[in-house]
Amino acid sequence: MGKIEELKKQNPNFNINIIDIINDVYGKSKYTEMVINLIKNKYNKREGDSNYYSDIHRELVREYKVKPNKLIGKTVFELVNMIRVFSENIGYNESKTIEKFIELNEKNLITQKDLTTYKTIEELELQISLSDLKIVDKELEKQVLKLMETDEWLVLKPLSYQASVKYGSGTKWCTASKNESDYYFRYSKRGILIYCINKKTGDKVAGFKNLDLSYEKETSFWTIIDLRTDSIDCDLPEDVMNIFKEEFKNTKKTNWELLSEDERNRQLIQMESLNKKYDSTEYLAEGQPTAELRVTRRGDIVLDEEIAVRA
């Protein structure tokens, strides 16, 4: 028995039959047949719509990395239901995490090799976080100010957007978002931004103190999933916590002010370039889905005629 057949046998609730589902709802075979015919007619009309087909095909290939040869011969009905499997049962952001995990695992960079042990997406994110630390290049190392490093802990100030993304990998922090640079620059200009990384578990904590008098006073700590928390609940050892206390008490310069004028100008040019990329139609053509398709990934809509994208 092949592995996939074995998985089907072990997980019978995943072997879903749409006709059985329809019949469970309507009760009698004559009504089930009627509903099947209605659905068939609905999708038969769409088979000739090349725009509709292309939108779904593009979504699966670019966003969920389905190999194009796996879609050959698939009907619109089959493609729509493939998207639903991802959007409603996995989720778009989660699928990206899985994709990143697989990429790192194929490069032999994942520490926990037994894939059967993973039960939550957060466990994958922690492994990604650990793996990313192994592949930080020399240039990015120059774009942080290390405050402390031991065999277990790394505490630093990110001094560039690229460094913030890299060292904040696997978190939900807005300052480490791959698709939005403004948040990093906003916080780096306003105050002191510090990342704390456990090199053994992959867990991360961010700390921020506002120095901008035009904003309210703020000293905050954030978990790896971007939940604001009390410093005492971060479970950081005393020597690590003392780094935060020392910096927040005595440092008068924001992360941005630690940079030279030339470096600030260089980063501003990069930020402008990134923002143009995110806003351009060229970026959409490279794989960023339209707003309508982005909603479908969250499972809020079901690719009906009223909301189908016309690229």
Image (cartoon, grey):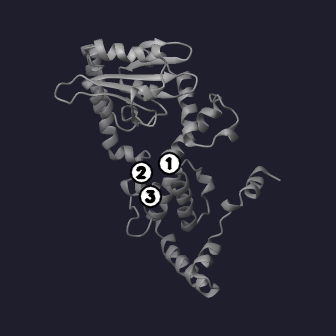
Q: Secondary structure at mark 2?
A: loop
Quick one: 148 or 129, which is closer to the camera?
148
| x and y, in percent, of residue 45 in the image | 49, 75
The residue that label 3 is drawn on is 296
The residue that label 2 is drawn on is 289
Q: Residue at x 43, y 63 (%)?
A: 301
Quick one: 238 or 248, which is closer to the camera?
238
- Amino acid bearing label 3: Thr
The quadrant of the image that shows the C terminus is bottom left
Quick one: 236 or 310, which is closer to the camera?
236
Q: Secondary structure at mark 3?
A: helix
**Around disc 3, counting alpha carbons within 10 Å, would you say few (fewer than 14), some (14 to 19), or many (20 or more)?**
many
Q: Secondary structure at mark 1?
A: helix
The residue that label 1 is drawn on is 62
Q: Is residue 214 left or right of residue 133?
A: left
Q: Find out whether the residues at labels 1 and 3 contact each other: C-beta distance under 8 Å.
A: no
Q: Image height check: is 294 above or below 154?
A: below
Q: Residue at x 31, y 43 (%)?
A: 279
- Amino acid bearing label 1: Arg
| x and y, in percent, of residue 41 in the image | 52, 79
